[in-house]
Amino acid sequence: MNADPDCIFCRIVAGEIPSFKLLENDRVLSFMDINPANEGHCLVIPKTHVPNLFEADDESLAAVATACRRVADAVRRTLDPPGISIAQANGPAAGQSVLHLHFHVIPRRADDDLLFNWELQPGDLDAIGRLAERIRANLE
Ligand code: AMP
Ligand code: ZN
């Protein structure tokens, strides 16, 4: 498994930076986004450090896709949003701010006016932690 000591997500995988974890296995980690675009926004990443989709190996991608569905399903059962977007950015022009491959799972409302390149706004960490517990309880 590759790790980049300067990468914030590798540091989360290594447990050097705290996170609100939702799901973890050999290949994948999922945790709450601390700057949620909407309530319930979370991330799914391969544990191995790859900067983007193009450099990911097939096994990691398959594991991430399966985890995205499980996490999105748990978010759906927890918050019952009218929609859920799965988003993934490659390159700064696409809005990628962390250069470790990640998929966003974002609950959506018809009127949320969310744009592809949304602004990062810090969320309430206590509320995010409580929500992570509820989502974890709904993981199947
Ligand atoms: P992107 O802008 O597509 O690269 O997405 C990176 C995401 O990582 C943003 O939504 C950030 O809010 C999120 N993020 C950055 N640092 C952390 C962290 N320490 N814990 C959780 N989420 C983070
Ligand atoms: Zn990394």
Image (spheres, grey):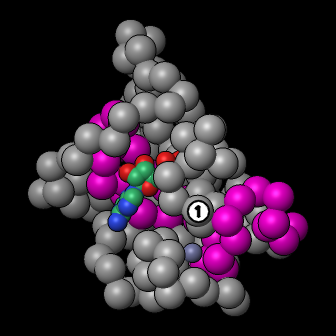
Ligand 1 sits in which quadrant?
Answer: bottom left
Q: In which quarter of the image is residue 40?
A: top left
Front position in the image: 26 or 122: 122
Quadrant containing the N terminus is bottom right
Q: As displayed, is residue 57 above or below residue 84?
A: below
Q: Work out whether residue 24 can be spotted.
A: no
Q: Position of residue 27 (x, y in %)?
A: 66, 78
Image position, residue 21 (x, y; %): 38, 69
Q: Percent position (x, y) of residue 131?
A: 25, 52
Q: From what the image shows, is residue 131 above or below residue 29?
A: above
Amino acid beneath label 1? Leu
Q: Nearer the viewer, residue 138 or 23?
A: 23
Identity of the residue drawn at 45% across and 88% down: 14
Which residue matches tag 1?
A: 99
Q: Residues within 10 Å of mark 1 (few under 14, many from 20)?
A: some
Based on the picture, tell me whether residue 46 belongs to the magenta stretch.
yes
Residue 59, picture quadrant: bottom right
Q: Residue at x 51, y 44 (%)?
A: 105
Q: Give the range drawn in magenta.
A: 30-58
| Above or below 21: residue 106 | above
- Is there any visible trace of residue 110 in the rendered image? yes
**Hey, which residue is sitting farthest right in the picture?**
58
**Disc 1 element:** loop
Task: Establish whether ligand 2 lies closer than 8 Å to the Cβ of label 1.
Answer: yes
In the picture, measured across the screen, residue 84 lies left or right of residue 55, that is left
What is the total number of numbered labels drawn onto the structure image? 1
Q: Residue furthest top?
A: 111
User: Which residue lies at the image location 35% right of the left edge and 87% below the top edge?
Assistant: 16
Picture residue at 59% right of the left edge, 46% below the top: 92
On the picture, is 5 further left or further right than 53? Answer: left
In the foreground, 34 or 138? 34
